[in-house]
Amino acid sequence: MITCDGGAELPVQWVYEGAEDCDWQRDRSHWPDALTPMDVWRRNASWPGVDRAWEEAAMEPPAMFYRFQLAGPFLYVRANPYELKRLATIAARYHEVVRQYGNAMKFWQEHGEPRIQAASRGLAATSTDKPLRASAELWAYGFSQTFTAQSLLGEANLRLIALLGPIAGDDAMLRSLEVTQGGENASQTIDTEIWELAELARQTPAVANTLNSDAADVLASLRREPTAAKFVAAFDALVDRHGSRSQGWDLALPTWSERPDAPLSLVRAQLRSANASPAAQTARSIVFRREATERALAQLTPEKHEEFAKIVAEMDGYVSVREGRAYWQMVITGEMRALLLRKGAVLVRDGSIDRAEDILFLVPDDFEGQPASDLRALVTERRREWKRWCEVTPPAAIGKPAAAPTAAALPPPDQLRGAPASRGDATGPARIIRAPEEAARLQSGDILVCVMTTPAWTPLFGIAAGIITETGGALSHPAITAREYGIPAVVAVQGATTRIREGQIVTIDGGAGTVTLAE
């Protein structure tokens, strides 16, 4: 048992022998809330799919991707790596794969992406009479394709950081990412589609007025508006293309098909802004990368230039791979959720539960191979238990955490500290956003404050003047996206959504990792 603040105890079954001696950190960046019973079951049932993905790639996963650890309904990621000898063997194999394919992007395009696409199609085609265990394994097999490609990038990035270390010091991580940013990616494609919808809305006053209104159901109002037919058709096409994409990595989060008000809120936010087009922002990112590369070459000794160019070539398409894999992570998660909702609809038809989504509070043993029975009381009990866990703050680390870092000097009373993620300074009113459906509240010049962001949030980066998140690091989604959009970002600001007031004027320094609060 693991004891939480407040005395609640978390049951722990260690995921492999010796796991209790490792440093496990809670992953709030991807799974900020307690997982539902079905999500916990899916995790525990999916490991054969994970192993198959790595076996096909003929690679060994790094420690953080080999297994995730559950403590009750909370997910933890291993933070300490393997021993050096094992790491060297793994890295040597990664080099062989990169040589075989040319770089990590080609490996993703030729190996990983086709497999996750096929797995997503497989889940979409799965009938409701099939056992869920096979689907859990298929989901994990597809999802793990994104980790194989990321591991190749991560190993190359470590070598680039080591190369830049002597000239950049503590800034080497950020500088390594700046020389590899840019390029077309899946999130940028959707950003462009959102921006084009906003431009289309501007051409029809009735559409723009409806989107800017406080109507209870904006989409329904648009469907009744005769002059909105072109806009509605284009919006419906957007949802058709990307409707299976979940809004996050959690099965409890709906897809765009279920909640079209989420992408519509992004369009509404874009309509109210006066920001540059995604194409213009992409061009700015390319310039920034060129400048960062020229600065690095000017500081490196000439004999290091070839090594620098070789590593950067291995990482070519870094953002494209990262955003492509994130897009497909959302899609395959959405397809797994859709399958569960289809099975839930059968249980509703049989009188076992009230709503299809109630299946998230069951596990297959409750209904597979069993005669139809009334499961409502069980759902109610487990939902109540899940809500209780959502109010609990679990430990930030379990197992045997590494020694705590030396305590830094306390910041001034008007300053919060986090991790630098994207350079630059910005001052503006804080807008605390908790879900994409709230996007319409964000206006040009606002500082977006949230727990985390997912690819579903990306269009907001074209509106916000800066980003503050409670979780993440230099490799996290908000950090990568902020660099692409050329706006400052500070991540891992503990308690940002509660310590910063809605509308409070804040100044962020993305290079220093500080947030200064106005009175």
Image: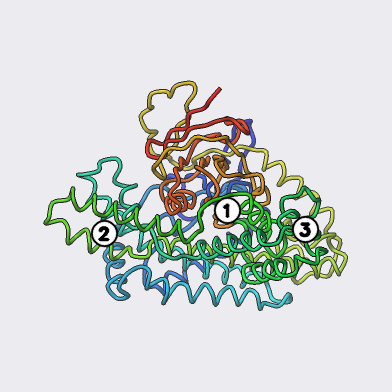
Q: Which mark is residue 358?
A: 3
Q: Given this view, does label 3 or label 1 mark the residue nearer the observer?
A: 1
Would you say the residues marked 1 and 2 are in contact, meaning their CB atoms lie under 8 Å apart?
A: no
In the rendered image, residue 372, in percent from the top left (x then y), is placed at 84, 68
User: Of 475 and 504, which appears nearest the observer?
Assistant: 504
* Above or below for 431 versus 329: above
Residue 318, x across and y down, in percent? 38, 61
According to the picture, the residue beneath numbered tag 2 turns out to be 88
- The quarter of the picture where residue 93 lies is bottom left
Q: Which kind of residue does numbered mark 1 sit on?
A: Trp
Q: Residue furthest left?
A: 303
Callout 3 touching callout 2 (CB < 8 Å): no
Dot 2: few (<14), some (14–19), or many (≥20) neighbours within 10 Å? Answer: few
Q: Residue at x 44, y 61 (%)?
A: 322
On residue 457, the disc is 1
Q: Is residue 387 above or below residue 410?
A: below
Residue 142 located left or right of residue 378: left
Vertical side of 361 occupied by 111: above or below: below
Q: CA distance from mark 3 to mark 2?
A: 47 Å
Under mark 2, the amino acid is Ala
Judging from the image, what secondary structure is the residue with disc 3 in? helix
